[in-house]
């Protein structure tokens, strides 16, 4: 009844606050050098890419829960990490998008990915382990970007309870994902990333190419559409991969399955 609806709304609010607890001040994807962020007592000193342009600025639009491009803030310094109350810090999406765009990361359609797989490329599914075990692209290997929440601190438990209200298990990013990548794959192995939806780096909406040849500007697409494949791609670049040996599947596993391409389960 009404009480259940109210409880669901409260859980949804908790879910948002847990995932985006800190919104950095307006900042730019400039030459950032070594970035530091507290991660539960540890300091992250990973070197961000040094070719990020200084003319790209952005800010967090709290009213619409989205990042928007605003070049008035280009060249200003700020922390490029978000530190959630549960889990480790991670790089904000506009910085990820800018780096991937500059690196020339490209997408491939599922049929092309299948052809590349037969030529020796490896499909790396970055979805959570349980989703991968259910169904995945045939021949894919699982290197999940997220894992189930392992902590037992207050906010870890709150997140678990909140997600249980949606009949879901709470997840968090793998704080050592670069190390995980290097432990499971050969350095510079040819990789095709796959998640559920694929995501896009395209900043235009292209639903009517016959009428709008250059696409349509949309504030919701200021930095494409984020996905786990694209977030994982950022980590692969940090681990030494390049656009010559790293691509991602357009439309992700959902499109692969819709196209009727070979699928498998972990039981097979």
Image (tube, helix red, strand yellow):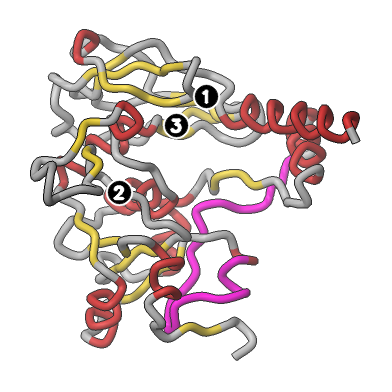
Residue wearing tag 2:
200
Residue 206 visible in this rendered orientation of the protein:
yes
Residue 108 found in image quarter: bottom left
On screen, residue 98 above or below 142: above
2 lies left or right of 115: right
Q: Position of residue 51 (x, y in %)?
A: 14, 33
Label 2, secondary structure: give it.
Answer: loop
Measure the alpha-carbon separation of dots 1 and 3. Answer: 7 Å
- Determine whether, in the image, residue 39 is placed left or right of residue 201: right
User: Considering the numbered disc 3 on the image, is that residue within a helix, a strand or a loop?
Assistant: strand
Residue that sits furthest to the left in the current view: 213
Q: Which residue is mark 3?
A: 44
Q: Position of residue 119 (x, y in %)?
A: 21, 85
Specify the segment rendered in magenta: 131-151
Helix, strand or loop status at disc 1 = strand
Q: Residues within 10 Å of mark 2 (few under 14, many from 20)?
A: many
């Amino acid at each position: 009844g009404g009480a259940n609806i109210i409880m669901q709304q409260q859980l949804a609010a908790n879910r948002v606050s847990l995932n985006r607890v800190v919104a950095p001040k307006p900042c730019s994807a400039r030459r950032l050098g070594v970035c530091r962020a507290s991660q539960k007592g540890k300091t992250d000193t990973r070197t961000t890419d040094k070719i990020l342009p200084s003319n790209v600025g952005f800010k967090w639009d709290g009213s619409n829960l989205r990042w928007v491009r605003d070049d008035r803030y280009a060249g200003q310094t700020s922390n490029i990490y978000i530190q959630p109350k549960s889990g480790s810090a991670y790089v904000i999406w506009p910085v990820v998008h800018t780096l991937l765009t500059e690196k020339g990361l490209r997408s491939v359609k599922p049929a092309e990915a299948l052809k590349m797989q037969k030529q020796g490329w490896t499909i790396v599914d970055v979805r959570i382990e349980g989703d991968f075990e259910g169904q995945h692209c045939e021949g894919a290997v699982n290197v999940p970007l997220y894992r189930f929440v392992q902590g037992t601190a207050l906010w870890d438990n709150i997140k678990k309870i909140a997600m249980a209200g949606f009949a879901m298990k709470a997840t968090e990013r793998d704080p050592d994902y670069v190390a995980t990548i290097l432990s499971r794959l050969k350095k510079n192995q040819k990789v095709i990333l796959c998640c559920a939806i694929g995501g896009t780096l395209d900043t235009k909406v292209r639903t009517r190419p016959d009428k709008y040849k250059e696409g349509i500007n949309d504030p919701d697409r200021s930095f494409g559409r984020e996905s786990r494949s694209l977030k994982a791609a950022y980590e692969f670049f940090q681990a030494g991969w390049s656009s010559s040996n790293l691509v991602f599947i357009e439309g992700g596993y959902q499109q692969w399955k819709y196209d009727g391409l070979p699928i498998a389960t972990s039981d097979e």
